[in-house]
Image: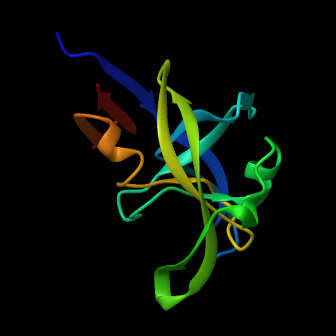
Amino acid sequence: MPKWFKCTYFPYISEDPKTGKKMEVFRPTIPVMISYNGNPSWDFQALIDSGADRNLFPAKLGESIGIDIRSGKKRSILGIGGYKIIAYTHKVKILCAGKSFDTEIDFSYEHEQPLLGRDGFFNLFKHISFSEKIKEMAFKF
């Protein structure tokens, strides 16, 4: 019997670029924790990003659980608009949907939003679906 986990999009306050007015924007995020050498992080919201090749998190989050960020494998990551940043890869555990998974996360001092990408997150599940109308995601184990 397939096991599904569902969660709703998380509301953020944003600014309309045309009017400058504050508005509520719902984003497909999921509550997660990460752990390194048994040191867990706090719960936080990570963006589910189907356009991200890999997981990318802020370096400060990794440092908070004892990761020596610059000791990881160094890599260049090309983002939107061709903007390149440097990140360092580390093996961690990610805890979400009541389960723990071994994965890799690229940590960068030039990035602030935790992103969960295709390699290292999407591939941990049999199926992930998004429903924009009801602002909900479903994950099948």
**Could you say where residue 112 lies in the image, as x and y percent from the top left?**
70, 63
Q: Quadrant of the C terminus?
A: top left
The residue most toward the bottom is 82
**Residue at point 48%, 88% (across, down):** 81
Q: Is residue 66 above or below residue 20?
A: above
Between 19 and 5, the one nearer to me in the picture: 5
Q: Quadrant of the N terminus?
A: top left
**Could you say where residue 25 lies in the image, as x and y percent from the top left?**
55, 52
Q: Is residue 46 left or right of residue 36?
A: left
Report the label total.
0
Between 114 and 104, the one nearer to me in the picture: 104
Between 5 and 95, the one nearer to me in the picture: 95
Q: Is residue 79 left or right of residue 38?
A: left
**Residue at point 30%, 35% (across, down):** 125
**Residue at point 32%, 31% (across, down):** 138
The residue most toward the top is 1
The answer to whether one can see residue 17 in this image is: no
The answer to whether one can see residue 37 in this image is: yes
Rendering colour mode: rainbow
Q: Is residue 136 left or right of residue 76?
A: left
**Residue at point 36%, 36% (across, down):** 137
**Could you say where residue 41 lies in the image, as x and y percent from the top left?**
74, 35
The residue most toward the left is 1
Q: Is residue 107 above or below residue 8?
A: below
Quadrant of the rendered structure where residue 111 is? bottom right
Quadrant of the rendered structure where residue 123 is? top left
**Could you say where residue 71 lies in the image, as x and y percent from the top left?**
72, 63
